[in-house]
Image (cartoon, grey):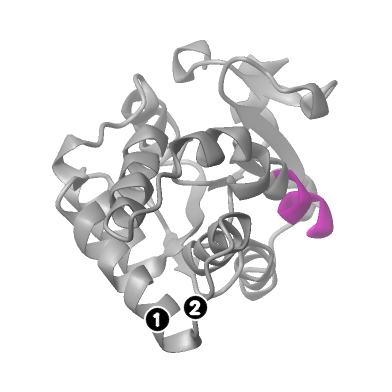
Amino acid sequence: MIKKITKKYNFFFFDLDGVIINSLDIKNQTYIELYKKKNFFIKKILYKNDNLLKGLSRKKKISSINKLIKLSMNTKETQNLIEEFSKIYSSKLKNIRLFDYYLSFLKKIYKTKNIYCVSSSPELEVKKILHLKKINKYFDLIKGAPTTKYVNIKKILNSNYINKSQAIYIGDTKKDYIAARKNEVDFCFFGNPKPKWVRDKMHIKSWKDL
């Protein structure tokens, strides 16, 4: 079934972190460093609450972490923390790698398919990463925060008059699945192992499978 994905769909929507780039450990380390400066040690909290925090925009993730550790911040302080995260994370971008075989898959489909990257990371950062990895040219459109994944997907579908039955969103979180479902497009989970909520949904273990 999964090998037929390129025949069935003409419009491919990809999440970024955990799908295109193997960045989740580096992002978690960035959050750990960020809060360590404030004398909060959040490593166990991050991994214990992975399902809650994964797939959130940076602003929502920081707000959620603050609630978990009972750290009160006003809007300005939260924004300062977001900006500080971006600075630390930007210094680590060179260490982020594409998932194995993803580039091969892109090269296989980009001439005949429409390809979009829709992420919850800040849009300018997403574009910077894809440019740094020299794959931005393969995407018809790159979208990110502050607009949500659901809204970005919806706008792309509507503005391009896309037949939803020919569209698929490939992500690695339940929030990605919800964004796809609300937009009435198919969803495929990327990653291994497969979480329980994926059940009978499409599943890609590795880009090599395609």
The percent coordinates of residue 140 (x first, y second) are 42, 58
Foreground: 159 or 19?
19
Residue 137 shows in this picture: no
Magenta range: 177-183
For this view, does 202 lie left or right of residue 42?
right
Which residue sits furthest front?
A: 39
* Amino acid identity at mark 2: Met
**Which residue does the numbered mark 1 point to in the structure image?**
77
Q: Position of residue 123 (x, y in %)?
A: 39, 67
Quadrant containing the N terminus is top right
Residue ID at (56%, 56%): 69
* Residue at figure coordinates x 48%, y 41% from the top left: 112
- CB atoms of marks 2 and 1 within 8 Å: yes
Residues at marks 2 and 1, CA–CA distance in whole angstroms? 6 Å
In the rendered view, tell whether residue 5 sits above or below residue 41: above
The residue closer to the viewer here, 51 or 175, is 51
